[in-house]
Amino acid sequence: MILNNKVIVVTGGAGLLGKAFIKEILTSGGIAILTDIKISLAKDFIDEMKTEYPDSFYASNMDITNKNSIVSLIKNVSDKYGTIDCLVNNAYPKNKNYGKLVEDVSYKDFSDNLAAHVGGYFLTSQQFGILFKKNKGGNIINMGSIYGTLPPRFEIYKNTEMTTPVEYAAIKASVIQMTKYFAQYFKKDKIRVNCLSPGGIRDNQPKSFISTYNSFCSKKGMLNPSDVASTLIFLISDSSTFITGQNIIVDDGFTL
């Protein structure tokens, strides 16, 4: 049980990756705190985890762009479990216009999406960092992306309605750099801060897209959420005690 009852808060826990992270944390011996702006999106999953792990699982609404919401969650979890060991910044806030082609993106939509996503990661890192500094140690893991490190390969989207939004590239590049900033800032406080940047995750994409994407990879191509979750467990665990300020890429060679 590699996590040894560590208390881990996962934002965006009701999503595709979030649910995989929660399950892997629980099976690895951790205490998983699922937070999302609307946990009702994962009602069946939450009910299942509550039944299977009644003492090691807790779910709560939390808005990463609202300081009071974050502070309230920190207090409730700390009161219930006595401590918090790790924050996983996995939420993916976006407005209704997110995902348009560059020519159609308004300044307001671009700014709003960066403010919510990057600003939300800043706010949670700030507030949990204050807690971890008081506790004399902690761990923050931000979810980045391969497209925070290299420009999109637009050819893989040919003949599909898909694209990599310009906001996404700007957001994830910012998250990677902010990770390094917080790692340096909290280095003397025994707080580790790292970034996990996955490649493409299978989620019912068109076969043509998957085939072209996979041609850039080594073995498997597009990943399943569990392929990323195993690396997350390593970053949470004491096996990575001396790793901080790093961006760990899990992409089966796509970025090479």
Image: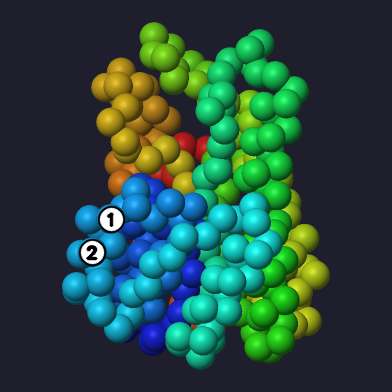
Amino acid on which the number 2 mark rests in the picture: Asp
Horizontal and vertical percent for residue 229? 38, 59
The count of marks equals: 2
Residue 68 seen in this snapshot: yes
Residue drawn at (46%, 37%), measured in percent from left and top? 254
Q: In this view, does 252 lie to the left or right of 138?
A: left
Asked if 154 appears above or below 64 in the picture, the reply is: above
Q: Is residue 149 left or right of residue 199?
A: right
Horizontal and vertical percent for residue 158? 43, 12
Q: What element carries label 2?
A: helix
Amino acid on which the number 1 mark rests in the picture: Lys
Residue 240 seen in this snapshot: no
Toward the viewer: 4 or 155?
4
Asked if 244 appears above or below 167 in the picture, the reply is: below
User: Residue 47 bears which disc, if any?
Assistant: 2
Residue behind mark 1: 43
